[in-house]
Image (spheres, grey):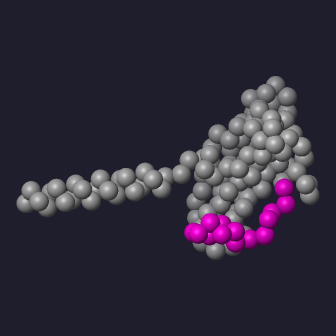
Amino acid sequence: MKSLAKTTVAVLLASLVATAGIAQTIESKLEQMGKMSYVRVVGLKQVVRDGRILLQLELYNDDNRNQTVYWRTRWLDDSGIQVWDDEPWKQELVYSNQRRVLQVVAPTKNATDFRVELQSPENEGVGSSKPAGS
């Protein structure tokens, strides 16, 4: 009986370690083109409805001025292979000291993962200008 209990505990611990390694943070889903100085991503949620990912992204502008943000989603399969064409950049205005919720639905049921690309003209470093094609 002790052997069974030890085996069960070992399996549970191994499962917890594996799950912890898989857990993803908001940062792992974002690709920022330069460091965003004033706008922060404060929430990221996803659910699957009718076989497609519904993604909700919450931004917060902690500046006293309105900020423009450009964003798009790259849709991926389980292997990390892109399963849809590049989306055009979307432009959003985030008012001063306000939150803004953005939503998008995966264009295909083959999309099981995603990356959100973000940038703002107020960014520091690489990509601090308006994205090409916008």
Quadrant placement of the C terminus: bottom right
Residue at x-position 74% and y-position 52% = 117
Examine the image and state in which quarter residue 49 appears. Answer: bottom right
Q: Say whether residue 23 is magenta.
A: no
- Magenta segment, prevailing SS (helix, strand or loop): loop
The outermost residue toward the left is: 1
Q: Is residue 111 visible?
A: no
* Image location of residue 39, percent across then percent down: 75, 36
Residue at x-position 91% and y-position 54% = 132
Examine the image and state in which quarter residue 36 appears. Answer: top right
Residue in front for this viewpoint, 61 or 9: 9
Quadrant placement of the N terminus: bottom left
Residue in front for this viewpoint, 57 or 132: 132
Residue at x-position 82% and y-position 25% = 64
Q: Is residue 29 visible?
A: yes
The outermost residue toward the top is: 64
Residue at x-position 85% and y-position 28% = 65
The segment highlighted magenta reads 76-89
Picture layout, residue 39 above or below residue 10: above
Picture layout, residue 117 above or below residue 93: below
